[in-house]
Amino acid sequence: MTILQTEIRQEWLEHILPFWMNLKDEQHGGYYGEVGYDLNIIRDKPKGGIATARILWSFASAYRITGEPQYADHARHAYQFLSGPLYDSEHEGIYWAVDHLGAPLDTRKHVYNQAFAIYAFSEYYRATGDEEALQLCIRLFRWLEQTGYNRVTGAYREEFDRFWQEQPNEMLSENGIIADITMNTHIHVLEAYTNLYRVWPDEQVRLALDNLLVILHERMYDSQRRRLNVFFDNQWNSLIDLTSFGHDIEASWLIDDAMQVIGSTHPAYEQMVIDMAYRVAEAAVQSDGSLMNEQEDEHVDTSRIWWVQAEAIVGFYNAYQRTGDEQFLKLIGSMWDYIKAHIIDPRPGGEWFWSTGDQGEPGQREVAGMWKCPYHNSRFCIEITERMN
């Protein structure tokens, strides 16, 4: 193993995973909903569907790769909560959130949330062979294709109420607009279906993946600017001039992963993957080695968000594997140095800071919460150590 591999694997096994293991709620199930910046566990916070799915994915992956029984135990604990209190067995689908006791709190259904459940359940099946988890995946997949996919617009819908009546997309709209269609939902449906296809290579999933690649390339990708547009109305008009550098570099490798799983060698998709990685490398890498967040019109948000750094390393390594261009390896080395110096929380009982500012100072947001989960940084550790092998 290289020094980089060794350090990253150590960070995963000795720092990230132990932090999340410590949040297991033995009394009410699932994992505690929030840890503040002060590292105090807030035990009565809601437990989110997305957070629980990501925790399940993280522990299932850890068990699949290491074979350590402790990770299987944590994966089972997360699985029981996601398939239990967070699952609406009456009307189908995963709730947005339950309260700390496990009672339904926010019963909205979002396609993004269902996608993460598919991602997590398929990984749990991949790690354990639990047939019930696979059947849950298949049910959710069929439900999304039947209800979540809009054949008129050729896009996945976004937000629904508990009874699957479509609602304005409040949960995944940002920057002052409400979007009918989002890039973010589509790349994570792609990610979920890719993992599902690994364990259930059904023709329906293959066709859905083919369709998603068409959507991303034909509808969302701006080849002139080498980016994915972010927010759209129902006529596919882009609503805002926004470049999300983190999503672009994440999408670059997720698209490539989907292509490899289904055996696609579409040259236009391959070019998109490479061009997005080069564009992010050229436009968003800072002099300190970190990656900035986004640019809206002329305004640049230079915040260094934890997940953006993690996904950038995977995306740049994927680009190196695609091109052999060693500049991507240099970027990875500098970015890992930045993560070690500024993003990883050195305090006893800490994990990764949400973000850092221009001087490397940590932001004061929660360390664990509805959106702050172990999946981005766990996955970065897994992808890099396995790809380098």
Image (cartoon, rainbow, N blue to C red):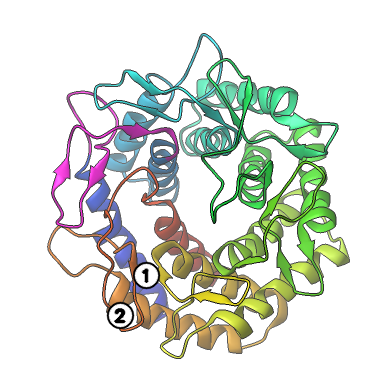
Three-letter code, disc 2 = Gly
Between residues 111 and 338, which one lies in front from this camera angle? 111
Q: Which residue is mark 1?
A: 8
Q: CA distance from mark 1 to mark 2?
A: 20 Å
Query: Magenta segment range?
Result: 24-50
| Helix, strand or loop status at disc 1 | helix
Whether 9 is drawn above or below 335: the answer is above
**Residue 12 lies in quadrant:** bottom left
| Main SS of residues in magenta | loop
User: Taking the image as drawn, is residue 389 in sight?
Assistant: no
- Which residue is pictured at 27% across the width and 53% down the height? 366
Q: Which residue is mark 2?
A: 360
Badge nearest the viewer, 1 or 2: 2
**Residue 166 lies in quadrant:** top right
Marks 1 and 2, the one that precedes in the sequence: 1
Position of residue 217 measured from the top left corner of the image (x, y, whole percent): 81, 58
- Which residue is pictured at 71% across the width and 60% down the height? 229
Q: Is residue 337 rendered to the left or right of residue 154?
A: left
| Helix, strand or loop status at disc 2 | loop
Between residues 53 and 365, which one lies in front from this camera angle? 365
- Which quarter shows the N terminus? bottom left
**In magenta segment, residue 46:** yes
Position of residue 343 measured from the top left corner of the image (x, y, whole percent): 31, 71
Between residues 158 and 118, which one lies in front from this camera angle? 158
Position of residue 266 measured from the top left corner of the image (x, y, whole percent): 87, 61
Whether 88 is drawn above or below 318: the answer is above
